[in-house]
Image (cartoon, grey):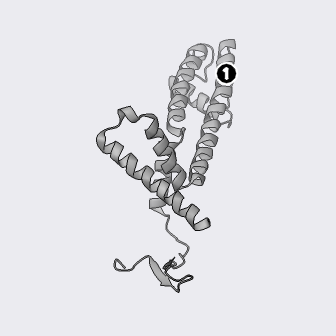
Amino acid sequence: MGDEKPFEKVSKTRPGHEVLRRKRQPRRRLRIAPNVPAGMKFLRIIITQTPFVPMLSILTVLWLLFSAAFYFAEHTANPDVSSYGQALWWTMAAVETMGTPFKPITTAGELIGGIWAMFGVMLFWGTIVASVTVYFARRKEGTLKQIVSTVEYNLERLDDLSLEELELLKETTDRLIDVQIKKREEVG
């Protein structure tokens, strides 16, 4: 398997040209076990390239703060909120829109609960929608666009790059330009 070449020669279309065709990989069969490497790659992309982790952090901090505020507003008047843990559960249930068997009694509790329900739902579902959108937008981008965006990013911070990074940037841009020149020569 290690000695196989990914390309095979095909008959020449023009004198002097050498044509290579990529060898076709055998079709893959349906896997019964989950594809763990693909799942890990998906998680890595979600964690590193989408707003999921920062938004989840913000949501967690707000959840803890609103739970504390809800607890202090309700714990003396509402027997159903006798501990901070119950306030945490109530605020989580309010965000998940599954409802709770008890409702706030005090005006402050109703106000805090209403604001939390709106913000929490927007942040929770917004985080999921934003992460999925970014994930699929990045997958659609393609490798070449990712390389170009990396080059553009590095060009913007030329003064901060080391000598090795500058040399790598030069090699990369030279290769990109060479590929584009070859494409234009083939067309024209």
Query: Considering the numbered disc 1 on the image, is that residue within a helix, a strand or a loop?
Result: helix
Q: Nearer the viewer, residue 69 or 50?
A: 50
Reading the image, the residue beneath label 1 is 115
Question: Would you call the spot at circle 1 few (<14 residues within 10 Å), some (14-19), or many (20 or more)?
Answer: few
Residue shown at 40% from the left, 35% from the top: 158
Q: Position of residue 140 (x, y in %)?
A: 60, 54
Q: Is residue 82 above or below residue 155?
A: above
Going by the image, does 123 lie left or right of 167?
right
Q: Nearer the viewer, residue 90 or 139?
A: 139
Going by the image, does 120 lie left or right of 22?
right
* Residue 82 visible from this viewpoint: no
Going by the image, does 122 lie left or right of 57?
right
Q: Position of residue 79 (x, y in %)?
A: 61, 20
Could you tell me which quadrant the N terminus lies in?
A: bottom left
The quadrant where residue 116 appears = top right
Can you name the residue that lies furthest to the left here?
A: 163
Could you tell me which quadrant the C terminus lies in?
A: bottom right
Q: Is residue 25 above or below residue 41?
A: below
Q: Position of residue 15 (x, y in %)?
A: 52, 83
Residue shown at 69% from the left, 18% from the top: 110
Q: What type is the residue that disc 1 sits on?
A: Ile
Q: Nearer the viewer, residue 179 or 144?
A: 179
* Residue 141 visible from this viewpoint: yes
Residue shown at 50% from the left, 43% from the top: 49
Q: Is residue 19 above or below residue 182?
A: below
Q: Position of residue 112 (x, y in %)?
A: 64, 18
